[in-house]
Image: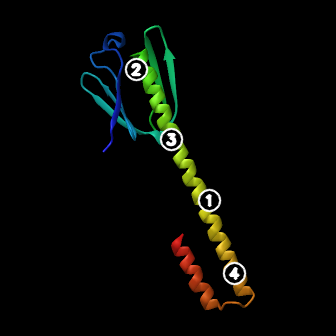
Amino acid sequence: MANLLLVIKGSRIKNGSIFAHQLLIYDDLMVFKKRGLITRHEVTISYNHVSQVYLTRGLIFSTIEIINTGGIESIFIKHVLNGQAYQAKKTIDKKIHYAHEKDKNRVEERGLEIQNLEASLNRLKELLNKGKITSREYNKKREKLLKQA
C-alpha cells in the first residue's frame, strides 16, 4: 500500500477556478487531479516517467512544472504556497533520482548476466571444438544455460 507523503494544491482564488489542481505525492507514484465543472481528469505518474521538476518562485506563490516522459503533457500547478512547493520539489527530486538509479542498476546487472552467458557459451564451444565434450553434452549444457538466462 502506498503511503501519502504530500498533497499539493494551487490557490483556487489566484487560479480563478472553483476547483484547484491537486497533486498527491505518494512514496511510489504521483496522482495529478484536474477538475472542471463537469469533467474530472486523473493521471497516475510513475517516478520513472518524470525527467525534471521546475519550480518558479514568486514572493508568496510558486509554480511547479513536472516534465513527464510517459506520454502525457507536462503538469503545471500554479499558485502553490512557496513552502509547500519547495517541499514538493525536494520530495519529487529524491524520488525520481532513486527511481532512475534503480533502473540504471538493473540495466548494468542485465549487461553482466549477458556477458557471463556469452562467456559460458563460448567456453562450451571451445570444449566441443577441442574434443573435450561430445556434441550431445554440448547441446544439453547449452540448452540448460539458455533456459537459466
Instruction: Determine whether 88 is above or below 126 in the image.
Output: above
In the rendered structure, find residue 47 and report the number of the disc placed on it.
Answer: none
In the rendered structure, find residue 84 and report the number of the disc placed on it.
Answer: 2
| Residue topped by disc 1 | 111
Q: Are marks 3 and 1 in contact (CB under 8 Å)?
A: no
The answer for how far apart the CA atoms under marks 3 and 4 are is 41 Å
| Residue topped by disc 4 | 125
The answer for how far apart the CA atoms under marks 2 and 3 are is 21 Å
Q: Secondary structure at mark 3?
A: helix
Residue type indicated by callout 1: Gly
Q: Secondary structure at mark 1?
A: helix
Instruction: Determine whether 56 is above or below 48 in the image.
Output: above
- Estimate the x, y position of residue 111 in percent, counting from the top left: 62, 59
* Closer to the eye: label 3 or 4: 3
- Assess disc 2: are there few (<14), some (14-19) or many (≥20) residues with their C-alpha within 10 Å of its C-alpha: some
Q: Earlier in the sequence, mark 3 or mark 4?
A: 3
Which quarter shows the N terminus? Answer: top left
Residue type indicated by callout 3: Tyr
The answer for how far apart the CA atoms under marks 4 and 2 are is 62 Å
Q: Earlier in the sequence, mark 4 or mark 2?
A: 2
Q: Residue at x 60, y 85 (%)?
A: 139
Which quarter shows the C terminus? Answer: bottom right
| Residue topped by disc 3 | 98
Q: Is residue 70 visible?
A: no
- Estimate the x, y position of residue 141 in percent, counting from the top left: 58, 82
- Estimate the x, y position of residue 123 in percent, counting from the top left: 69, 78
Q: Is residue 130 left or right of residue 141?
A: right
